[in-house]
C-alpha cells in the first residue's frame, strides 16, 4: 500500500463518519477506519491524533478563521463588525458541499456523552481564541468575553438553522441573521420586564 494517498485526510474522515454512523463511535476502531479508506493505521495517525479528532479537528480551523477575521477587521471596527467578520469567515469551512459530513458528525456526537464533553472543551477553546483576538484590538476583558460568547452562540444558532435549510444555501447569511437576533433579544434585557405585569 502506498504511503502517499491523494486526499488521504478527506478519505479517512469520510470512512470514519460512515463507520461511526453504521456501527457507533465506540465500536469503530482506527484499523477499521484506515481499512475502509484503503490505507493503514500509520497513515491515519499522520492526519489525526485519535479518532475523536476526526470529529473535532475542524474546530481548530474555525478558531483560526474567527481570530484572523477579527484581527483583520479595520482599525475602527465596532465589536459587532468584528463578530460579523468572524462569522462571515466561517463560510470558508461551512460550505454546502461539507453539509452532509457536518450532519453525520452532529449525529455521532449527539449519541455519545464523552464526545459531547469533548465538543464543549473545543467550544471553550474557540471562545478563548475569539476573546484573545478581541483583547488584542483593545477591547476590555469583560466586553471581549461577552462578545466571544455572543459570537459563539450566534454561530451555534446559525449552524442549527443552516442544517435545516436547503442544501445549496450558504452559511454566512444564517450567521448574520443569528447575530442580529441575539442582539435584539439582548437589548430586551435592559427593558422593564414584561413578566412582572
Image (cartoon, rainbow, N blue to C red):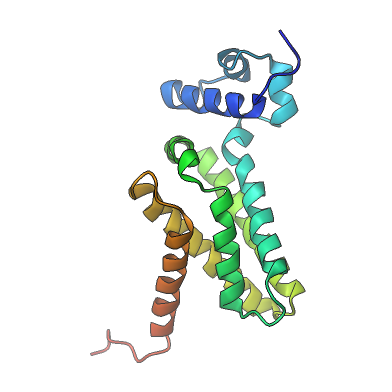
Residue at 52 percent of width and 48 percent of height: 94
Picture coordinates of residue 87 (x, y %)? 55, 62
Residue at 59 percent of width and 67 percent of height: 85
Picture coordinates of residue 177 (x, y %)? 41, 67
Residue at 40 percent of width and 79 percent of height: 184
From what the image shows, is residue 118 above or below residue 66? above
Which quadrant does the N terminus fall into? Answer: top right
Which quadrant does the C terminus fall into? Answer: bottom left
Residue 80, by quadrant, is bottom right
From what the image shows, is residue 2 above or below residue 100? above
Horizontal relation, residue 96 to residue 140: left or right: left
From what the image shows, is residue 177 above or below residue 41? below
Can you name the residue that lies furthest to the top here?
1
The residue nearer to you, when weighing 151 against 49, is 151
Can you name the residue that lies furthest to the front here?
168
Residue 71 visible to an observer of this rendering: yes
Picture coordinates of residue 71 (x, y %)? 72, 68
Q: Please count the marks in the image.
A: 0
The residue nearer to you, when weighing 13 against 85, is 85
Residue 128 visible to an observer of this rendering: no
From what the image shows, is residue 126 above or below residue 118? below
Picture coordinates of residue 90 (x, y %)? 57, 55
Horizontal relation, residue 166 to residue 56: left or right: left
Amino acid at each position: 500500500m502506498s504511503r502517499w494517498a491523494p486526499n488521504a485526510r478527506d478519505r479517512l474522515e469520510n470512512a470514519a463518519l460512515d463507520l461511526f454512523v453504521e456501527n457507533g463511535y465506540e465500536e469503530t476502531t482506527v484499523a477499521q477506519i484506515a481499512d475502509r479508506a484503503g490505507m493503514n493505521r500509520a497513515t491515519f495517525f499522520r492526519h489525526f491524533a485519535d479518532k475523536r479528532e476526526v470529529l473535532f479537528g475542524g474546530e481548530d480551523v474555525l478558531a483560526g478563521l474567527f481570530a484572523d477575521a477579527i484581527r483583520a477587521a479595520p482599525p475602527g471596527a465596532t465589536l459587532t463588525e468584528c463578530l460579523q467578520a468572524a462569522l462571515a469567515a466561517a463560510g470558508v469551512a461551512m460550505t454546502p458541499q461539507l453539509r452532509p459530513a457536518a450532519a453525520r458528525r452532529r449525529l455521532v456526537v449527539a449519541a455519545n456523552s464523552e464526545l459531547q464533553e469533548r465538543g464543549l472543551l473545543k467550544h471553550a477553546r474557540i471562545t478563548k481564541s475569539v476573546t484573545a483576538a478581541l483583547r488584542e484590538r483593545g477591547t476590555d476583558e469583560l466586553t471581549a468575553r461577552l462578545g466571544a460568547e455572543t459570537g459563539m452562540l450566534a454561530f451555534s444558532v446559525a449552524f442549527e438553522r443552516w442544517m435545516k435549510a436547503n442544501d445549496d444555501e450558504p452559511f454566512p447569511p444564517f450567521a448574520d441573521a443569528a447575530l442580529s437576533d441575539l442582539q435584539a433579544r439582548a437589548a430586551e434585557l435592559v427593558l422593564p420586564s414584561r413578566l412582572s405585569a
